Image (cartoon, rainbow, N blue to C red):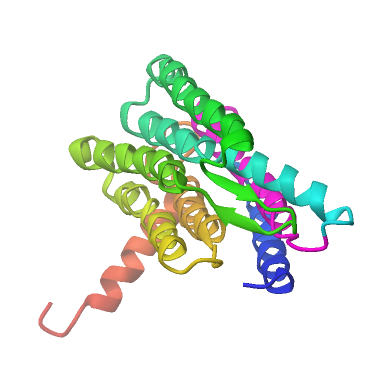
Amino acid sequence: MDLTNNIIINIYSIILLGIIFFQSFTNDEKDSLQNLIYQRTLQLTIVLLVLDMLSRFDGRPDTLYYAINHIGNFIIFLASPCLPSLWVMYVHINIFKQEKMTKRLIYPLLAINGINAVMVVLTQFFGWYYFIDTNNIYHRGPLFLIASLFTCGLLMVAFIMVLTNRKKIKEEHFFPLVFFPFPPIICIFLQIMFYGNSLILNSVVISLFIVFLNIQNRNMYLDYLTGVNNRKKLDNYLKKKIRESTADK
């Protein structure tokens, strides 16, 4: 994918996430830990989309491209496990509804991100994850797959958490929680197989959008004080039953 196409797709994704982010402030539970984690995930994805554009300034080593390319790739690899880490916390708070338990996850997740950070720093000297040659061209390093495993591993942890605690999850919440990791993981495998194509962050936008729709639907049909279904939900339920009715039923 060339730089121009990448910029167009990423800008479109950033606009969509920006709309979702500002809409999240109208959430009746906007001060909850769950909504806070979701907002931080949106913010981080926007930042990474910007950095993703900066990490594609290959060639022309005698210009500012050289510095932009190095800085962009460094931060992208540094922050890659942060997104799935936030998703693990989001899934946990959705399942167990206990903020103290969810906050305890910060320490093991920080440890995982710390290990990745050390690897990224050492990569600048040994080219483990990637290296940029004297012509300012990006190349994968021999340990590139390890960087992908950090992301895939955390997404799978969240996925397994959803499956093993399915009975604790509302039926309407199950699909967005279980679906979230599939677009990013598919795009990670596509990136590994087809060098030069990367739509991982854009696929995260799709997953976040589906979660957003779920959040908005929940708030639209629940009374904010009691948490039970409201009149709008009843009206929709009755319309559905009328549509499904027949002369015999």
Asked whether 183 falls inside the magenta stretch, the response is no
In the image, is residue 159 above or below residue 115? below
Whether residue 32 is visible: no
Furthest residue in direction front, as rendered: 134
In the image, is residue 162 above or below residue 190? above
The quadrant of the image that shows the C terminus is bottom left
In the image, is residue 157 above or below residue 54? above
Comparing 100 with 84, the one in front is 84
Whether residue 58 is visible: yes
Residue 74 position, x and y percent, is: 66, 40
94 sits left or right of 82 in the view: left
Q: Residue at x 49, y 56 (%)?
A: 213
70 sits left or right of 205 in the view: right
Furthest residue in direction bottom, as rendered: 247
Residue 2 position, x and y percent, is: 68, 72
Comparing 145 with 22, the one in front is 145
The magenta segment: 31-60
Q: Quadrant of residue 192?
A: bottom left
Comparing 173 with 129, the one in front is 129
Furthest residue in direction left, as rendered: 248
